[in-house]
Amino acid sequence: MKHHRRPLHPARLTFLLTVALGLIVLAMGFMLSQTPAAEAQDNAPTPTFTPFPWAPTPVPLVPRGDDDIINILLLGTDLRSTTEPFRTDTTIIMSVNRTAQTVSLLSIPRDYYVWIPGWNWGKVNTAYWRGDYNKWPGGGFPALAYTIEYNFGVRIDSYALVDFNGFLNVIDTLGGVTIVVDCELASYKLRAYDLDESNDANYDWTVLPVGVHELDGITALWYARSRLGTNDWERNRRQQALLRAIWRRAREVDILPRIPELWNDITQTINTNMTLGDVFGLVPLALTLDESRIESHFLGPDQLRFSSTSGGASILVPRSYDVIRATVENMYSPPTQNVLVQDPPRIEILNGTENADWELVAADRLSWEGLLPFANGPAHSTDFPNTVLYDYTGQTKGSARDVIQQVLKIRAEDVIVAPDPDRTVDYRVILGASYNSCTYNPAAPVPSERE
């Protein structure tokens, strides 16, 4: 399903800044406070309350080391009414390393079962509302922030929250976003945001096949929220893909330099504790940050398993707390420590099939590993049965060959090592009919969408 971008209307530019601040905070990260992160962590007050006798022990803080790190919580909420309970169904920790000038993202599935201090056990997506309801000092964000700290050992410094309506306006004002789909998504999509969700007649069966697509607001929201036939962690990855897409599009329309003049309108669109001074320092680095310096992390089937509460609600619980800890510590490791990021190889992707855009899909998939491949259109033939990898470096130590082979699922017999000192590229991949781009979609039970 492809949508044509609508012209950018000057009267709606304010919504673009929501992108720059809320949803693509990953691009703005090297700013926030003038207070060093380590000092802010040491001086942050700890909430006091009478704990339940059965409360678990808080997780120790993960050391930030000597690096200047800021942790920002990106939140997407299903809030429609200020009088009803709402959930933060998108919860992403963005860890900004201002020393290494890198960004790491960690998605926390909405059904992850956590201890909510001052409340009890519950899904992480309820902690914000619980804080508001129980009159936690400062409201919902401090309650959720301390819940994250209590369960993960990560102290949160700032947050940005956007609801469905804000998200839709951002996408539509941008004229849509370009998204690379590597796993076909098929489910019922609401025709318009303001329609009755309980009326089946308001839905259309929608299929988004593998390829490159332009999404309008309502389709992007469906893409971010849908779990039919997938699961919580697959949805988390789609949300991070949308973050990257929105960030790229915001840079294309050159809106970031206009932040100061539109700041008042921004703060009426989103909920954040950041100031204009926090944000203004982002512009130079936001315009130069490349995706090899953005690292994505997830709590998925290797770390979590499905369970249920005594009341029968489906939840996600750790396989072990050690693997959760390892994932969080990995989030703190800058992507620049990877030799493939420090000196990225030249990787050319060619499409040896008749399937449109497969080379773009494969290139995007490799970019998630910190590589910077480039798609170079069709190969000399479109009838390759299997994907072939040519290695013109002949190197083994620090080589990208194993990463490319593993990510693209290339058979060992289809790897051709041919060292060439006069090479124009280090690796060439020719995709064949055997290529399966959907490697992120683990088979697992799917909790009910309405739980």
Image: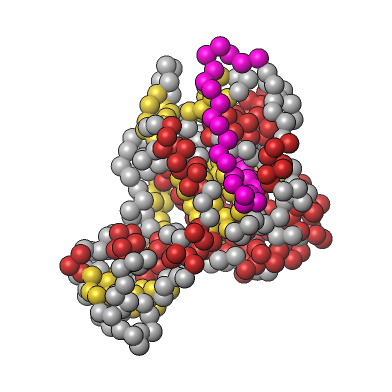
Q: Nearer the viewer, residue 201 or 29?
A: 29
Q: Nearer the viewer, residue 364 or 219?
A: 364
* Residue that appears at 62% across and 68% down: 288
Is residue 287 visible in this depiction of the protein? Answer: yes
Viewport quadrant of the N terminus: bottom left
Relative to 35, is 310 on the left or the right? Answer: left
Seen in the picture, residue 198 relative to 358 is either above or below; the reply is above
Could you say where residue 251 lies in the image, as x and y percent from the top left?
63, 66
Residue found farthest to the bottom? 422
* Residue that appears at 33% across and 55% down: 438
Numbered circles on residues, count: 0
Could you say where residue 375 lies in the image, as x and y percent from the top left?
41, 74
| Residue 68 part of the magenta-drawn span | yes
Residue found farthest to the left? 413
* Residue that appears at 30% across and 84% down: 420
| Residue 243 part of the magenta-drawn span | no
Point out the stretch of residues depicted in magenta: 50-75
Is residue 428 visible in this depiction of the protein? Answer: no
Q: Main secondary structure of the magenta part?
A: loop
